Amino acid sequence: MNPLELVSKTLYSFNEKELTYQLLDAFGKKAETFQQYNEVAKIFFEIKNFSKAIEYGENALKKALLHEEKHITSKNLISAYNQCNYPEKAITQIEKCKKITPNDPELLFEETISYSQLGQSEKAHKLLFNLSKIKNLPEEIEKKVQHNLSGYYFDKDDLHTALSHFLIETEKEAYKNIELPSIEKWDGNIKENETIIIDANCGAGDEVMHIRFMKNLKELGMRPIWATTRKHLSEVFNYNGFESVCVWDKPEYPKDSVWVYALSLPYHLNLTVHDLGRSPYLKPLPEKEEKYSYLQKDKNFKIGMFWNSDSGFEQAHFRSVDFFDLWNVLHQPEYSLYSLQMSDNPVPETCKNHIVEFHSDDREFADTFSIINQMDLVITSCTSIAHIAASIGKEVCVFVPIMEYYSWTSLTGKSWWYGDNVHLFKQQKPRDWSHPLKELEKFLNSL
């Protein structure tokens, strides 16, 4: 590891992101050779600043003299383009690289990603199946191929097969940096009165989506306990009759308990899309309902809005909508607008007088449930806000990116996982939300 890489990664590990970026930019501005630009690009990519990786990668490509340098840089750029949601640029480089290494597994896999991001799912799936037939694929590529084939089966409403592919990498990634529960893992066999710990090592939206399956386990005679890191979400679950504990409270379980990864419940229960349920299954806490009951005094049509995901998810930009694009549709005298964003994404100053924000330091998940319950409509990107609104039966419009999360897979504009209160508006082009916004405008006019 050279000194620049060592210092950069050390700073980044101390959560000094901006200082790391400034350091690399300082070196990048003085770069003159291919090696210098390429080194800065490589480090930016490894710390997941893909836009900067592209900037310096493109400069490296201009400076490259040898065919090998051009080929390696192009391959690096392909991955950065896909990570940054520029699949059309990735395809251009892929076509060049395939002339040199047409059977490169990494290259062929990136090609499937590019076509998926362009909305050409049939072509992407065909390429994935072709790739899966190649003998002696590198193990890492083989796992990614099998994982991504889940999209083909989700599109076919084959939930069980889709989840068998989806869970390959999802569960592995969930426990990559933490210890597995010390008790035995559930083998999927139902045992009367057995305690089963459902480990919710996943996103908040995933928790809301999967908590309902505790009912299935109880009906089969087991004793399910939901284990979460989100204490206030646990309170909502308990109020709704789903036994839940917070892991930070260090709960003790019966010695013969087993555990299961929360997202794998529909798979182990062998559910079909018709078994998922369409009725609301969560209610807000009464004390929080009283806290936000003052919102009922607003007799306008109340719309809760969430446009920008900043949860730490490295591809959050795929599902974030520009505030002003949404504002142009919703800024109507008959609507009262309420921001459901947290304080790290405030309403722009020019619009603060027209939108109510709930940016208190003590805002909990339980607050969010009740705020949403006071709304007439929720409009959101595909985050936990969408799942909360859907689970309590609130009318909700969800902006769905081209490469959608499986809960929003749909050919009908409706979700398998929720009722007719959920309306899906899917993106048609990368980085472009104009089509979903037009669909939203038509929907609002039809109310």
Image (cartoon, rainbow, N blue to C red):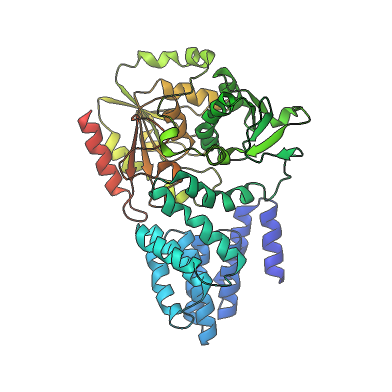
Task: State the image quarter where residue 306 is shown.
Answer: top left
Q: Residue at x 47, y 83 (%)?
A: 100
395 sits to left or right of 27: left
Residue 116 in the image, given as x and y percentages of width and height: 40, 59
378 sits to left or right of 227: left
Looking at the picture, tell me which residue is in the foreground, 444 or 324. Answer: 444
Looking at the picture, tell me which residue is in the foreground, 141 or 41. Answer: 141
Image quarter where the C terminus lies is top left
The number of numbered badges drawn on the structure is: 0
Looking at the picture, tell me which residue is in the foreground, 57 or 91. Answer: 91
Residue 59 in the image, given as x and y percentages of width and height: 49, 74
Looking at the picture, tell me which residue is in the foreground, 155 or 233. Answer: 155
Residue 261 in the image, given as x and y percentages of width and height: 62, 40
Inspect this view and state whether residue 65 appears: no
Above or below, 148 relative to 434: below
Image quarter where the N terminus lies is bottom right
